Every structure is written in C-alpha cells, then in structure tokens.
Amino acid sequence: MALLELRNLHVALEDGTEIVKGVDLAVNTDEIHAIMGPNGSGKSTLAYALMGHPGYQITDGQILLDGQDVTELGADERAQRGLFLAFQYPHAIPGVTVASFLRTAINAIRKARADGEDDPIPVPEFRKQLMGAMDELKVPRELAQRYINDGFSGGEKKRVEILQMAMLQPRIAVLDETDSGLDIDALKIVAAGVRKLAGPETGTVVITHYQRILNYVEPDYVHVFVNGGIVEEGGPELAHKLEAEGYEGFSPNGGGES
Ligand SMILES: Nc1ncnc2c1ncn2[C@@H]1O[C@H](COP(=O)(O)OP(=O)(O)OP(=O)(O)O)[C@@H](O)[C@H]1O
Ligand SMILES: [Mg+2]
C-alpha cells in the first residue's frame, strides 16, 4: 500500500473545464518524485486538487492517503493527516505573523493527532524549533515576526514555504515550482531542506520545469506531465532528456515520442 495514491484522478475548474484528465500516481515513503511538464499543462491544478482547494473539483477518481480515501475531505483535514503543499504563488496573510501562523498550524495538527484534545506545543519548545529551522534554512530571524508573505521577496516566500515544511514535518510534501525565482544559494538551501525531510516517514513530489533543482535533489522517479496527464515515466535520466529535448516529442495521449 502506497503512502499516497492517485487513482484515475480527474480535476475540473469551477466552470466545469476539465484540466487534469486521469492521473495515476503512487508515492511511497523515502521516495522523491518529480513531475515535469510545460506551462499550462495542469501541474498546479493537480497540486491544488490534492490539497483540497475548493476552486478545483475532483470529478472522477480517488486520492488515498495511507490507504484511506481522502477525496471528500477538506483541506484542513488533509493537512492534519500530513499532506503539505508549498505553493507556486504563496499568498500574503496580512495581520498574521509567520510565527503565529506556524504555531496555529502545528497546534491544529497536534490536536488532530490527540483525537481532538487540545495539546498545544509549549512556547519555549516552539521557539527553539522555529529558531533552529530558520537558522538551518538561512531564513532571516526578523521574518518570523513579519506578516506572512506580506512584502516578502520572491526568494523569501519560497524559503518560508520550506520553513513551513520543515516545521510541520508532513508525510507527503508537494513542492510546486519551489525552485523558480531562487538564487543559487537559496536553491541549494531549499534542496537540502527537501533531502532532509525525505525519509522513512515522508514521500516527496517536486513539480518543476527545470533540471536545475534535480541536480541537488535526485528524484527516484520522473513523470512527464502534458495536457492534463502523465505521458511518460522513468528515472532521473528522463529529466536530463527533457532538459535537452524539451516536451515537443511527448504527445498528450501517451506513447512518448511520436
Ligand atoms: N482558477 C482558474 N481559473 C481559470 N483557469 C484556470 C484556473 N486554474 C487553472 N486554470 C487553467 O488551467 C490550465 C492549467 O493551469 P495550471 O496552473 O495547473 O498549469 P501548470 O502546469 O501549473 O503551469 P505552469 O508550469 O505555468 O505553472 C491553464 O490553462 C490555466 O489557465
Ligand atoms: Mg504551475
């Protein structure tokens, strides 16, 4: 039984337009999967649907987490079960600091794991964890007291996404283009964060256009995503091939090169 399993997943926009057209994917602990595909192919739509974003309707198929069907669950319940998405375009939440956001999120997960009993993390322990993670990911400490993503630079937003991931210790982490807009030092830090998390408790899905991040986070599996579906799968060598040849050889209906 895979940690995360997508079975024939179809996702439509609110107006009914189908964007994701039948995706099968199994992600286990200790595995890093890369999903690579051209602009507008539906990668972010797939990620949003996985997280339970209300603007994206699952019209067919299933999402299983630890063998349990979570297709009908809300985003908060999925997060409590250990799903995490680092957004391609993180939103600002004026009035909510990074530190308070993280503490609230951690406490929600702790409460769910304690069968609904409040079990808040002691403040000194939280501070210690937060400062440790910030130092490790080289996130400036002053960001902890700023409103989340409000006026953050592109690179700061991405680092704070990885900070969230490090603090929440998800079981499945989906990183949507977390590498874009990062300078080379930040890219290495983000990649190190991903490598550290991926392990016996966690599986990772890295959505990206470029081979660049995959030089630092070697994927076990690469999935080529074109026009709403996975059209080819392979190992890390497939990412190199894409980098060299682009997506043109992949037809939307499967079958690889035409
Ligand atoms: N909320 C929305 N409203 C209207 N159209 C949408 C919405 N979300 C996605 N789409 C459309 O669905 C298609 C797939 O978009 P999506 O963001 O999933 O692509 P992507 O593969 O992540 O692209 P990129 O590589 O540029 O990030 C696009 O044509 C996009 O315009
Ligand atoms: Mg996208």
Image: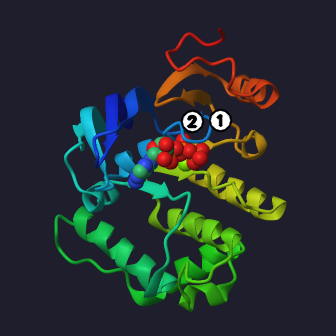
Counting from the top left corner in percent of width and height, residue 89 is at 55, 62
Residue for point 49% across, 15% down: 253
User: Which is nearer the eye, 218 or 120?
Assistant: 218
Residue 112 appearing in the image: yes
Q: Name the foreground residue: 235 vs 20.
A: 20
Is residue 47 visible in the rendered image? The answer is no
Report x, y in % for residue 180.
69, 55
- Label number found at residue 219: 1
- Residue 93, quarter of picture: bottom left
| Residue underneath mark 2 | 33
In the picture provided, is 211 more to the left or to the right than 250? Answer: right
Q: Amino acid at mark 1?
A: Pro
- Residue that appears at 23% across and 56% down: 74
Where is residue 147 shown, x and y percent of the image? 51, 87
The relative height of residue 147 versus residue 194 in the rendered view (above or below) is below
Which badge, 1 or 2, is on the more N-terminal residue?
2
Q: Report crowding for label 1: few under 14, some 14 to 19, many 20 or more residues within 10 A (C-alpha).
A: many
Q: Is residue 39 above or below residue 228?
A: below
Q: Is 134 left or right of 225, judged from the image as shown?
A: right
Quadrant in the rendering for residue 13: top left
Contact between labelled residues 2 and 1, with CB atoms less than 8 Å apart: yes
Q: Is residue 51 above or below residue 89?
A: above
Q: Is disc 1 placed on a helix, strand or loop?
A: loop
Image disc number at residue 24 = none
Q: How many marks?
A: 2
- The residues tagged by marks 1 and 2 sit, at their Cα atoms, a distance apart of 5 Å
| Mark 2 nearby-residue class (10 Å; few <14, some 14–19, many ≥20) | many
Q: Secondary structure at mark 2?
A: strand
- From the top left corner, tell me how far across and down residue 173 is, in percent: 49, 51
Amino acid at circle 2: His
Q: Quadrant of the C terminus?
A: top right
What is the quadrant of the N terminus in the image? top left
